[in-house]
Amino acid sequence: MNIQFNNLNDVTIILICLSIMLFSGFLVTRITKMLKLPNVTGYIVAGILIGPYVLNIIPAETAENMGFVGDIALAFIAFDVGKFLRKEIFQSTGTKVIVITLFESLFTGFVVTISMHFVFKLDWNFSLLLGAISTATAPASTMMTINQYKAHGKFVNTLLQVIALDDVVCLIVFSVIIAIINANETGVILFDTVILPIMLNIAALGIGFLSGMILDRLLIPNRSDDNRLILTIALLFGISGLCSAFDISPLLSCMVFGATYINTTQDKRLYKQINNFTPPILSLFFIISGVRLDIGTLSTLGIVGVSYFLIRIIGKYIGAFLGCYVTNMDETISNYLGLALIPQAGVSIGLAFLGQRILPVDIGNQMMTIILASSVLYELIGPASAKVALALSGAIEEDKIKTSKEKERYLQVYKRI
């Protein structure tokens, strides 16, 4: 199937495509609901189906031009994650979340690096970069699954704090690896590939903090709900625009924005307003991701790619388990946290592009293919894994997963694994 848009102007094409995307997402989620899968999975599948590699309804160039939707969606998601970074929650967990994050991220990077080099005999530079990228976890699909099933409790708080800190660790590790590679090859640390990105991300954190303080001053008690929403979105768009201008992810800045505001005001009502506004934006984000996924890359994944895909999952699970064990976390968190850390997209793909620049062309392309292709699989199974983890940990109420029998079925499958 191939719908021709040749005789239509750009505005008409975009509006029709947006309509098709939203309708297709709605229709496919009717099926995924029957299969008891999260909506995120349905949105990604819908995007793949209407994209250029299956039905070819949405032109590839149109989806490429909608990249800004991803920045906007990530800004909203990160802002919402920020509300879980409240000081009272950190006080209750102490340094436990930091220790867990370091274990699950660094252990994953270590096992991926060692496996790639010693098992597959790959170059140290390639292995180190792949290991650094493997530490990242994508918050978007996990966050949307949490919102869909209204999951809550200690497991959710711990999970989102770990995810929030995860990307910080990833960026630091990646920058250190880049510095090591550059120093080995040139004898100097290059400013534009190592120091500048660190400085820009620190600046982004400052902008997030400043934005939170500004919003606190703007949202006076008698401010209307409409204007509260307008001012918050204006700041989120501004942060996303600034981050895009310097080619950095808005995730960290918007997380700090959300964390600063909740800690200075304790205003949870604003986050509910944002959550009521964002469903169409988030669904478009995942549908567009599906449209842009080149499923043809899966055929070129190869044994190295498949191994990376599996080793990273194992590393995340064991690392999270060890971190929880060392910090004496509850058994439910220890057993199931790793299952909710599978998704990987956004940050990892961006870092893969950076890493590709310093590797030989053929090796750089191989790494890019591995990250892109594995991201397809991670985003497809990640939401379902997150739902299983949330259900088994008791974070989802029984009526949200229909019956206790479904939870028992998850438990039986988990035990077999």
Image (cartoon, grey):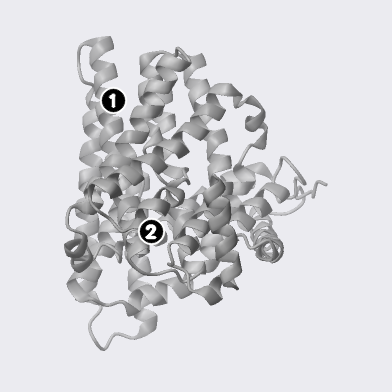
Query: Mark number for residue 332?
Result: 2
Residue 407 in picture, x, y percent from top left: 55, 64
Quarter of the image for the C terminus: give it. Answer: top right
* 11 versus 126 height, above or below: below
Residue 282 % position (x, y) = 51, 61
Horizontally, is 262 left or right of 282 in the view? left
In this rendering, position of residue 95 left or right of residue 78 = left
SS at mark 2 in the image: helix
Amino acid residing under circle 2: Thr
The amino acid on which the numbered mark 1 sits, given as a three-letter code, is Ile
Residue lying at 38% horizontally and 40% vertically, measured from the top left: 318
Q: Furthest residue to the bottom? A: 222
Element assignment for label 1: helix
* Residue at image mark 1: 177
Query: Residue 125: which quarter of the image?
Result: top left
Residues 88 and 225: in front is 88
Residue placed farthest to the right in the image?
Answer: 1
For the point 36% across and 37% down, the residue is 135
Asked whether the viewer can see residue 192, the reply is no
> Seen in the image, is 344 located left or right of residue 196?
right
Going from N to C along the chain, the mark reached first, 1 or 2, is 1
Above or below: residue 355 compared with residue 415? above
| Residue at point 72%, 50% (across, down) | 50
For the point 35% across and 46% down, which residue is it?
Answer: 321
Query: Residue 199: percent from the left, percent from the top?
Result: 20, 39
Labelled disc at residue 149: none
Q: Quadrant of residue 157?
A: bottom left
Q: CA distance from mark 1 to mark 2?
A: 34 Å
Q: Residues within 10 Å of mark 1 (few under 14, many from 20)?
A: some
